[in-house]
Amino acid sequence: MRTFILTCIVLLFIGNANAQSAADLELAEMLNSGDMLRLNDRYPQMKDSLQVPMLARLAEANLYVNFNQPDKAEAAMADLFTHHQQELDAQTQIGMSALRAMNFLNLGQYAAGGELGGTLVAALEQQVPFEQLYSFVFMERIGKALTHSPAPFLSRPTATQQVPMRIDSVGRGHHLMIPVQVNGITKDFIFDTGCSFGNFVSEAYAKEAGLEILSDSIPVSGTQIGYVKLGVADSLCVGDMVYHHPVFLIAPPNAETDSIFSFDGVLGYHFIRDAKEIILDFEHDCFIFPEQPSEAEPNMYLSSNTPKIRIFYQQQPIDITMDSGNVKSDLGAWFKERFPEAIPQDAQERPLKRGGFGGIESFTGYVLPEITFQLGATPFTLRQVEVVNDAENRLAAGSLGADFLQAFKRVTINYDQMFVKGEK
């Protein structure tokens, strides 16, 4: 949706040719390319030169959402819809409304998010197939089910916290496990930066932990679109930290994936975001939650609540998803087309499989014995990396999984300043 929204922005802007400045043109190009890190760097320098206020509000809304400032994002979007709605075409209004609805949910303003999601569903349900509508239905049903639930928040001791890490072998890689207590039941959850809303748990765990079920028909997408239940609890504890009013998506059993691995739960976006900074210490097998977050220049931004980080291959930048719940990193069709020389000439295409919510998907692709990238100035090497031929996701660079994190002695993931730093 974002790519289509930003294309509309550029078309709208070209129609205002007499009002545009060089800064407006540059801003439109950055928005259209989706280069959020460049936009974040350049916007403070160029904003006073802009001639189109609507374009500035669009840029600010996207920056605040992508760099984890939801309160500022809502202020920018409120201004956009109050003062510039007539300047937006229908598709841009739909896209920005969807962005705003999800931002409401992230703020814990569930009623507003559900209402806006419902408005989008009503406007589009007779025009588009469910495969294009389900994310709006997700927002509507989540928001309405949680209307009377308080917003989540984290309370913690002032001192630095340390929590043990367990590393489980799963298939071709590993899961990073963190102990989580809910309603007196302690289980090891998968630490998952790719879990984009609340937490994800099995039906068996939800029953054991006594989660309160609020809805049983929330559409989500994995290997296919399916339905999960929505549950809540009073709190969730990680060490001495207490996360109040957590939300849980509850997955039904799946014989195909359950035969490969079973899980109790996944610790996802909202807790990780509110913790601000988490250090994964692989020398001492622990998670560290510092008393004070550190500072560094951003090299990470959010895309649909999932982090993308900037790495380099042959000195060329790549913005790639960081999904710590993925047991192994993989590369997508975009990478193969952008760097064809990375695939050895004698490499043989082979069948590949990928598991997730909904079952197992089959692809074809290649396996690279090893490949070296850089995170900032620090090189890291991944081994036995699959390069997936996926025609439906040709723009995807791929995903950095648990093996990426394990390539370092310590990794700092910071949602406050939006950076990832690896130490050898």
Image (tube, rainbow, N blue to C red):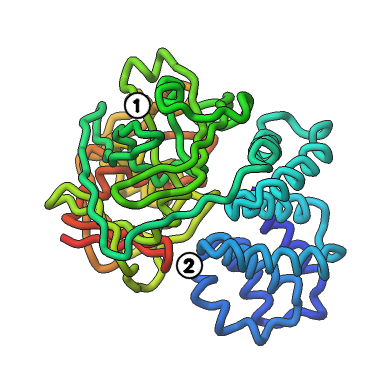
Instruction: Kindly identify the residue that appears in the image at 36 percent across and 28 percent down.
Output: 264
Q: Which of marks 2 and 1 is nearer the N terminus?
A: 2
Element on which disc 1 rests? loop
**Neighbours of disc 2 within 10 Å: few (<14), some (14-19), many (20+):** some
Instruction: Residue type at mark 2: give it.
Output: Leu
Q: Which of 24 and 139 is in front in this view?
A: 139
Residue found at the far top of this picture:
255
Instruction: Kindly identify the residue that appears in the image at 82 percent across and 66 percent down.
Output: 82
Residue found at the far left of this picture:
283
The percent coordinates of residue 269 (x first, y second) are: 46, 48
Instruction: Residue type at mark 1: give it.
Output: Phe
Q: Is 254 on the left or on the right of 167, as rendered? A: right
Q: Is 193 on the left or on the right of 79, as rendered? A: left
C-alpha span from label 2 to label 1 = 35 Å
Numbered disc total:
2
> Is residue 136 positioned above or below 88 on the image?
above
Q: Which of 269 and 55 is in front in this view?
A: 269
Q: Can residue 187 be seen in this view?
A: yes
The percent coordinates of residue 217 (x first, y second) are: 63, 25
Query: Where, by quadrant of the figure, is residue 184 drawn?
Result: top left
The quadrant in which the C terminus is found is: bottom left
> Is residue 18 positioned above or below 105 on the image?
below
Q: Can residue 336 be seen in this view?
A: no
**Neighbours of disc 1 within 10 Å: few (<14), some (14-19), many (20+):** some
**Residue matched to label 1:** 263
Instruction: Kindly identify the residue that appears in the image at 44 percent across and 56 percent down.
Output: 274
**Residue matched to label 2:** 37
